Amino acid sequence: MPTSRGEVPPLFYPADVAKVLGMSEWWVKEQARRGRIPFTRPGRAYRFTAEQVAEIVSMYEARPTIVGAPQARAVAAAAPKKPTQDSQPSRSAVRLRARMPRRAALHQQDAA
């Protein structure tokens, strides 16, 4: 979209947008590929205008769930509660064991 002087606005690379968002470049490209964030595609490359970057930032903006409450209370209310000693767990914990690697198993068979 040309500006009033006929200039073309600067386009930002996915790496620039990733740095602003604190995400990886791969994440930015994947979100654009899936159509989850706005982008410009001159040729086969993903590029972003300043307005699109601002829109992406606002899309991922989080607001407190309780209006007027301190931030810590809103986070504490949203956190899952730990079960008390009185509550019975639905299942007992099952301890998983790793399988022996094939190479190790083959060497044991050869040694025996």
Image: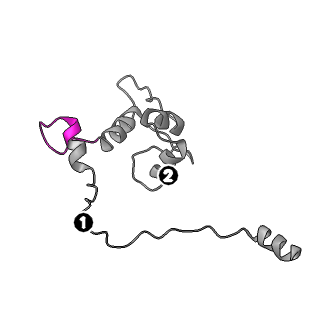
* 105 left or right, relative to 13: right
- Which part of the image, by quadrant, shows the C terminus? bottom right
In the rendered image, the vertical position of residue 101 relative to residue 50, given as above or below: below
Name the residue at 72% across, 68% down.
101
Along the line of sight, which residue is nearer the eye, 94 or 1? 94
For badge 2, the amino acid type reads Glu
Query: Disc 2 and disc 1: Cα gap in Å?
Result: 43 Å
Q: Looking at the rendering, which quadrant does residue 59 occupy?
A: top left
Of 68 and 5, nearer the camera is 68
Q: Which residue is mark 2?
A: 30
Residue 69 is one of the magenta-drawn residues: yes
In the image, residue 62 lies at what x, y percent? 27, 42
Q: Amino acid at mark 1?
A: Ser
Look at the numbered discs 2 and 1 and tell me whether their residues touch, using CB distance below 8 Å.
no
Q: Which span is picked out in magenta?
A: 62-73
Secondary element at image label 1: loop
Residue 49 x, y percent position in the rendering: 42, 35
Pointer 1 residue: 87
Which is more foreground, mark 2 or mark 1? 1
Q: Image point 30% across, 39% down: which residue?
A: 58
The secondary structure that dominates the magenta segment is loop
